[in-house]
Each structure stands twice: as C-alpha cells, then as structure tokens.
C-alpha cells in the first residue's frame, strides 16, 4: 500500500510540470506583458510609477529575460505563494483567492455531505425496492432534479423569496455581518444563509448520485456472493448493507476526489445569481477581463486539485477494494 | 427409512411480463438422512429453482405458490419433528436459523460466490457466529479447522486471503468449508463443479464424498452430469421442465431407465465400450416455458410418442415396483 501511494505521488510530478507550462503559456498569450498593462492602467487612473519601481517589478517577474527564465521565476514565486498581481482588482492574486477559498470550501463540503447523505440511502432503497411506488417517485423527482439547471432553480427560489417572504436569498451574510470580523454570531449567520445555495447546488448532484447508487446496487444485488450471504441465514437488511452496498459504494467513493476542483471553481452560475462571495464568480471575471495572473493561478490550482483529487480517490479505492490494492501482485 | 426432507407437489412460478414461467411445477421427491440425492436434468429444467425453493431463497418475480417442504428438525433433546419450511416466513428467524445452520448450500461459480471485498476468514467466521454460540476467537479457530478439513494448505494464512487471490478449486473448497462449518444435516450443492476443470472437479468430488461420510450429512447434488450422479448418488431424481419425471435408486435408474427422457439422457452419454460414429443427442430443445404444452411436456422430443395420447393427457406419477416412480403414459392403460 505504501509503495502504491509513493508511486502514485511520484507520477504526479511530471503532470504538474506540464500543467504549469500550459498555465504559464496562458499568461503569455495576451499581447504585451503584465507590467505594460499594469502601467497603462495606472496611467489611465492618473498615477505614475517611478522608473525604479518599474525596474523592481521587471526584475521580480523576470520580464526582460527569456520566456524560459520568466517561467522559472513565475513557478518559483507561485510555489512560494506569490501568484502575481491581479490588475483588474489591483491586489495580489493569493489574497484574492485566499479569502474566498475558505468560504467556497465550507460551502462545497456541506454540499458534498448533503448530496451523499440524501443520495446514498435513497439510491439503496430504490434498488432494493426496485419498481416500487417509492422507486418510481424518487426516479421521477431525480430526473426533474437532473434536468433543472441549478441557476434556474436559484432564480426561481430568489423570486419566491423576494415575492412571498420579502427576503433576499442572495449572499452568504446578513448586512450587519457583511464586513464584521469572524465571531460565533457571524458563523451562525453564514450557516443560516448557506443551506439555500447548498440545496440548490446539491440538487443536480443528488439526483445524479441517486441514479449511480441505484444502478450499482442493482448490479450487485443479483451477484452470487449475495446469494451466498443469504444462504448463511443473515438478515436481509444486514446482508444488503454488508455485501452489495459495500461493493456498490466503490464508484461513489472513487469519484469523491473529482469533487475537489469543483470545490474551488464552485458553481459559477449559481454563485453569480445568488451573489455568493465564493471563487466561482472570481474565476469567471478573471477570464472575462483577461486578468491573466489570476486566471493562470486558477488554472494551476484547479489542475493541481484535480490531480490530488484523483490521487485521493485512487488511494481510497485501493483501501476499500482489495482487488485494486493487490492488482499488481497476482495471486498468492 | 429415515426421511430428512420431503418435498411434495412443489410449485415455484416466475411471474414475468411475458407470462408465467412454471420453473418448478409439482415436484415431489425426498431425501434420506445421510444419503446423496442426485438431481439431474437439462439447463432450465428447474433444478436450481427447486434448491432455492427449499432454502426459501427464491427472489421476485419468482414465488413458491404451492406445495410442502417437510424438513425433519431434531431438537436438542433428540426429538425430531417435521416442519413445513413453506409455512415459515422466508426471512424470519426460524428459517434463517435453518438456512446456513441446518441446510447449507454451495454454488456453481465458486469465486463469484465469495465476496470480492471481504477476507475469506471473515466470511467463514460470520457463518459460525450466526449459528453457534461461540466467541469470535473460537469462531476463528473453527474456521481454520474447517479450512484444514477441506485440505487448504496454510489454512491460518489463507484466512486473510481474498477470493481473487485463490484458484477456482480453492474457492470451492472455501465455500464447502463455510457451508459445513455449522455441521448442516443437508448440503445442497448446485452444480458445484460445473465451472471447474476436470482434475479439480475430481478432487472436489472426492473431498465431498469423504466429508459426507465423516459428517453423516445428506447431500442434494444438482448436476447435468450423469457421470457424477453415477459416482456420488444413492438416489436419483430426474427433472424435465419443472417436473420430476422419474425417481429411484441410482443403480436401478442406470441399469433400467423407465422414462423415455431418462433413457435418452443415458444414451447421449459417450460410452467407452461402444464404438459409435455420432454422439447420440436428444432431438429438439427444451420448449419455451411461457407457452405450456398440452399433455406430457416431453412429447415433442419423445422417441415413444403416442399421437393422440401423449399430447392430450397429462401424465401423473406412477409407482412401480421396488419404490420407483415414473411420470409417463407408457406405464398406464393408455399404452398400446
């Protein structure tokens, strides 16, 4: 197992290097460099940078050197936490992303919990009682959930909130807590706001996960080993949970890792509609305004998280499924 | 005779969208304590469904609609009384204690019959803990002992193995160890060697015979292989389309088959002492289970078909001399 993890971690390195090169190329794509844009922006605002300041910035990012050196400088700075400057926001990229990342992660983690807490039991029930009225009802609702775009659901709920309850459903904080420092009251206020986006974002995921759980459980229910378990005289519920469900959880667990990039990018449209201070809208704006350091940092972080997520999934899967763990060793 | 299990008029139907498939249609037979009953027949004749009906493991859309399954249960005081398994709730505590505890089952595909994600030791001890009043460590001891009994080398290490790490033959040994861990009085073996190669098959059969003699347990051996039946069985039940068409002692049936279907089955065996150009086969195929035939279900394939009789009258079981039973109109007054 340790060897397996080590090997997988080592395999990440070349992929990460490749991705960083692609990200860097993206920074280089717009005409002119970051500094020219920055200086032009400042000039437009009526400010001037001194020659010395410009030189210092040039040296910091290696702008007057070959692309190769620039790349090395950029990636060295990146690894050390200096992701460059967002000229749209006129703030360091790391600060911009950092403050939204925590909120996004909390929200996405809650969404993940919400999705699995609802989808797994319902999926199992649906499979065990296949073609029962409950199964049909859940399947029907599931397809509606899958087919409804999240942002539309967000709009509808906001409309209902404003029209009938006189309350805005947007944002994650009430006005009095908007810029307040963190406190118990602020956390509570956040949680009170958060359930709504969690439910909205989670709807499609839940519907999808129910389908996956139902299908994989159905697949396993007819396997011979389930019959063996039944022939031992195990209770029906007990044997269902211990054998087919245990195996059917594999695809669900193995895709948890893929949720990591989702956690960062958030659900852009819903976040825009609901005016949530998460990373989604930031990424969207960065792309729209060619804010290249910000955009490249996002791409870099998302790609890294995708890789880490896949790695976590694989380790998780190897941990729960001996066939994968011992796959490369053959029989004993 | 000490009857362990008596199946009377068992009817298990599958209610499908295409219609009702009568997988087992009034099957009657019995198993004596400590004896081996061979159940033979082609694919789809209802052998496996009969076994699952006894275990009360038929899953929807299948339902056992009628019949009696009288199992002679012996209590701790040594008193025995028959229980009708069909009267017990299929998932209730009494049936669950019989299933696995008193009637155990092994299956056709040994590797697929073991859980892919649990160690074999866990799967065996689970069975022991369900039916015996022992501690987990005692259960582990028993499990290792059982693995040794089925000739698995390094049994204590194999406890930690997974099914995919063992060969098919080893997996079937594990299944046997698991099934026998609670000393059942009846083992139902549903084609236990069909998926194995002939060498392994011979080893497994030898093992089963040895264990059967040691443990004085009855075996209901389901197979389509008449060679195995000749080797293993004391009594034989021949099934065709969900019905028992003939039953009797193994020696009688092999020496003097009564039903034309049994005769045809025996003739389709390759023989060492006869030189033949072609292997004899039974003409036709098993008919569609959704559209039942009039009269005897075997009549379209029968070599002794009597027009106007076999396709009109449903044959009933007829008792012949020396305890044999056959379900054929040739042995009635209709025969010419």
Image (cartoon, rainbow, N blue to C red):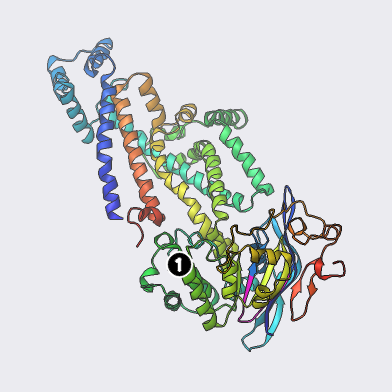
Q: Which residue is at the far bottom? A: B77
Residue bearing mark 1: B199
Residue B74 versus residue A100 in the image, above or below: below
Q: Is residue A215 left or right of residue B17?
A: left
Among the 4 quarters of the image, the one containing residue B99: bottom right
Residue at x-position 56% and y-position 43%: A211
Q: Quadrant of residue A107?
A: top left
Residue A133 vs residue A321: left or right?
Answer: right
Against A29, residue B22 (above or below) is below
Measured as percent of width and height from the top left, residue A80 is found at 21, 35
Tell me residue A105's x, y (percent). Answer: 39, 40
Give the residue displayed 73% in from the left and 57% down from the top.
Answer: B301
Identify the chain of the residue marked 1, using the numbered disc in the image. Answer: B
B28 and A18: which one is in front?
B28
Q: Which residues are magenta?
A: B28-38
Residue at (25%, 17%) from the top-left corner?
A: A38
Q: Is residue B306 left or right of residue A75?
A: right
Q: Nearer the viewer, residue A199 or B314?
A: B314
Query: Residue B225 falls in which quadrant of the image?
Result: bottom right
Q: Quadrant of the C terminus of chain A?
A: bottom left
Residue A92 shows in the view: no
């Amino acid at each position: 197992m340790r060897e397996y993890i080590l090997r997988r971690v080592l395999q990440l390195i070349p992929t990460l290097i490749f991705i960083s090169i692609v990200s860097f190329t993206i920074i280089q794509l717009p005409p002119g460099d970051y500094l020219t844009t920055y200086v032009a922006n400042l000039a437009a605002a009526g400010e001037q940078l001194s020659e010395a300041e410009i030189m210092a910035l040039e040296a910091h990012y290696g702008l007057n050197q070959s692309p190769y050196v620039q790349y090395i400088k950029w990636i060295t700075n990146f690894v050390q936490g200096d992701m460059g400057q967002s000229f749209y926001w006129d703030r360091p990229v790391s600060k911009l992303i950092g403050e939204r990342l925590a909120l996004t992660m909390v929200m996405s983690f809650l969404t993940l919990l919400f999705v699995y807490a609802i989808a797994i039991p319902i999926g199992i029930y649906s499979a065990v009682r296949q073609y029962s009225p409950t199964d049909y009802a859940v399947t029907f609702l599931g397809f509606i959930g899958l087919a409804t775009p999240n942002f539309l659901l967000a709009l509808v709920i906001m409309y209902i909130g404003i029209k009938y309850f006189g309350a805005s459903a947007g944002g994650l904080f009430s006005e009095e807590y908007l810029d307040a420092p963190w406190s118990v009251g602020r956390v509570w206020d956040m949680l009170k706001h958060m359930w709504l986006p969690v439910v909205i974002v989670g709807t499609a995921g839940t519907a999808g996960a129910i389908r996956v759980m139902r299908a994989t459980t159905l697949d396993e229910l007819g396997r011979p080993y389930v019959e063996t378990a039944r022939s031992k005289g195990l209770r029906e519920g007990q044997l269902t949970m211990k054998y087919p469900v245990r195996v059917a959880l594999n695809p669900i667990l193995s895709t948890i890792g893929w949720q990591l990039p989702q956690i960062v990018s958030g659900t852009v449209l819903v976040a825009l509609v609901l005016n949530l201070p998460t990373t989604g809208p930031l990424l969207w704006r960065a792309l729209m305004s060619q804010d290249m350091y910000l955009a490249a940092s996002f791409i870099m972080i998302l790609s890294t998280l995708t890789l880490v997520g896949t790695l976590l999934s694989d380790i998780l899967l190897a941990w729960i499924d001996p066939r994968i763990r011992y796959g490369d060793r053959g029989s004993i | 005779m000490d009857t362990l299990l008596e199946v009377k008029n068992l009817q298990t139907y599958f209610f499908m969208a295409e219609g009702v498939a009568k997988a087992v249609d009034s099957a009657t037979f019995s198993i004596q304590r400590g004896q081996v009953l061979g159940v033979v027949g082609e694919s789809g004749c209802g052998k496996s469904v009969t076994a699952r009906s006894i275990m009360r493991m038929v899953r929807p859309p299948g339902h056992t609609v009628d019949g009696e399954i009288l199992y002679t249960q012996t209590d701790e005081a040594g008193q025995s009384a028959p229980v009708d398994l069909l009267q017990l709730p299929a998932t209730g505590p009494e049936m669950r204690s019989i299933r696995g505890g008193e009637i155990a089952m092994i299956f056709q595909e040994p590797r697929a019959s073991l859980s892919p994600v649990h160690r074999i030791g866990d799967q065996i001890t689970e069975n022991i803990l369900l039916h015996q009043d022992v501690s987990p460590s005692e259960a582990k001891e028993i499990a290792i002992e059982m693995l040794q009994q089925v000739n698995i080398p390094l049994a204590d290490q194999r406890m930690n193995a997974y099914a995919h790490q063992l060969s098919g033959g080893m997996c079937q040994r594990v299944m046997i160890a698991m099934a026998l861990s609670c000393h059942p009085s009846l083992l139902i073996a549903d084609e236990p060697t069909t998926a194995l190669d002939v060498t392994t098959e011979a080893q497994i059969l030898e093992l089963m015979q040895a264990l059967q003699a040691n443990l004085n347990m009855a075996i209901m051996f389901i197979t389509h292989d008449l060679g195995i039946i000749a080797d293993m069985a004391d009594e034989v039940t021949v099934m065709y389309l969900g019905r028992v068409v003939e039953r009797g002692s193994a020696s009688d049936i092999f020496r003097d088959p009564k039903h034309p279907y049994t005769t045809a089955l025996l003739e389709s065996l390759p023989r060492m002492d006869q030189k033949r150009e072609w292997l004899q086969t039974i003409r036709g195929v098993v008919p569609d289970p959704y559209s039942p035939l009039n009269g005897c279900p075997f009549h379209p394939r029968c070599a002794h078909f009597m027009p106007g009789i076999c396709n009109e009258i449903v044959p009933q079981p007829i008792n012949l001399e020396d305890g044999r039973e056959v379900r054929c109109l040739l042995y009635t007054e209709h025969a010419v």
